[in-house]
Amino acid sequence: MDTFVKTNAMPLIDSIDGIRICIYNGDHRPPHIHATYNEYDILILIETLEIYAGEMPNKQLKQVYDWLSGNVDYALEVFYELNPELR
């Protein structure tokens, strides 16, 4: 995965079974991803996999954790590419 889809404010970096994994442009520390599924939205810290805010059903949350645990370096790279002032 070396490309991501840029939208206006939140590039989609991956999609899993209806779960959108995104990172905002001009975001804040600590480095995190946004995962959305239907009406649920959750922010998860990239380096520690801790929930920063929000909630998500357990089945989808496990899929997000599985994805992030295998893509930490990629997610950090995208986060800092979109937010270079936070390096």
Image: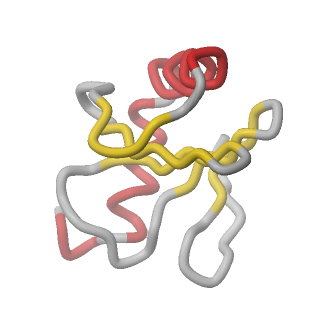
Q: Residue furthest right?
A: 17
Q: From this viewpoint, which residue is outermost toward the bottom?
A: 8
Judge from the rendering whether residue 87 lies leftward or rightward of residue 23; answer left or right: left
Q: Is residue 20 above or below residue 82?
A: above
Location of residue 24 (image quadrant): bottom left
Q: Nearer the viewer, residue 81 or 42?
A: 42
Residue 25 sits in quarter:
bottom left
Q: Position of residue 67 (x, y in %)?
A: 58, 24
Residue at image position (40%, 50%) is 77
Q: Nearer the viewer, residue 74 or 8?
A: 8
| Residue 18 horizontal side relative to residue 65, left or right | right
Residue displayed at 32% across by 45% down: 53
Q: Position of residue 62 (x, y in %)?
A: 56, 15
Residue 15 placement, left or right of 84 = right
**Image check: 7 left or right of 33?**
right
Q: Which quarter of the rendered picture does the C terminus lie within? A: bottom left
Q: Residue at x 40, y 65 (%)?
A: 81
Q: Residue at x 56, y 70 (%)?
A: 10
Q: Is residue 59 above or below residue 55?
A: above
83 vs 51, nearest the viewer: 51
Q: Quadrant of the N terminus?
A: top right
What percent of the width, then of the height, locates residue 80? Answer: 33, 60
